[in-house]
């Protein structure tokens, strides 16, 4: 299992309820999987800087983990915290749909 975290993960000033816990299910290093990882990292750095943790789960390595979050398609992003739990299927290339799906307000430019 690969795990990537934001640079602000260990910052004690960030309260847990302000942090997004995201789990991205992929299958190997396919084009869609790599795109989803890159798109998610970019989106989080732009809109959630210092307030997120990303866990990347490769279902080719740990297929049993798909059952816990009821994963039927990949790549799938699961927002665990803050509630409600949300799922987004695809390579996360449509930033507007991902932000709406995760209930994230766009960062002010």
Image (cartoon, rainbow, N blue to C red):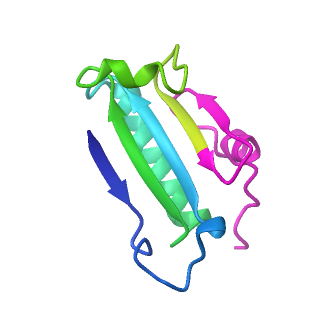
Where does the C terminus fall, quadrant-wise? bottom right
Please state the horizontal and vertical placement of residue 20, each as a whole percent of the image: 58, 58
Residue 92 in view in this figure: no
Please state the horizontal and vertical placement of residue 78, each as a whole percent of the image: 57, 37
Name the one closer to the observer, 103 or 43.
103
Residue 91 forms part of the magenta stretch: yes
Residue drawn at x 38%, y 30% is 33
Residue 4 forms part of the magenta stretch: no
Q: In terms of image quadrants, where is residue 46? A: bottom right
Magenta span of residues: 80-109
Residue drawn at x 26%, y 29% is 29
Where does the N terminus fall, quadrant-wise? top left
Residue drawn at x 35%, y 19% is 64
Position of 95 relative to 71 (above/below): below
Please state the horizontal and vertical placement of residue 42, each as a whole percent of the image: 48, 56
Residue drawn at x 23%, y 24% is 61
Furthest toward the left, the residue is: 61
Residue 87 in view in this figure: yes
Q: In terms of image quadrants, where is residue 26? A: top left
Position of 26 relative to 71 (above/below): below
Position of 37 relative to 18 (above/below): above
Furthest toward the bottom, the residue is: 13
Position of 17 relative to 60 (above/below): below
Please state the horizontal and vertical placement of residue 93, each as a whole percent of the image: 56, 38
Q: In terms of image quadrants, where is residue 94? A: top right
Task: Specify whether 48 is left or right of 68.
Answer: right
Name the one closer to the observer, 88 or 21.
21
Q: How many marks?
A: 0
């Amino acid at each position: 299992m690969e795990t990537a975290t934001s640079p602000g993960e260990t910052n004690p000033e960030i309260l847990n309820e302000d942090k997004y816990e995201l789990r991205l299910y992929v299958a190997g290093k396919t084009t869609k999987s790599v795109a989803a990882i890159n798109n998610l990292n970019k989106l989080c750095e732009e809109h959630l800087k210092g307030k997120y943790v990303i866990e990347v789960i490769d279902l080719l390595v740990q297929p049993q983990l798909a059952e816990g979050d009821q994963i039927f398609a990949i790549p799938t992003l699961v927002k665990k915290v803050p509630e409600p739990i949300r799922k987004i299927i695809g390579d996360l290339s449509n930033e507007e749909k991902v932000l709406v799906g995760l209930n994230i307000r766009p960062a002010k430019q």
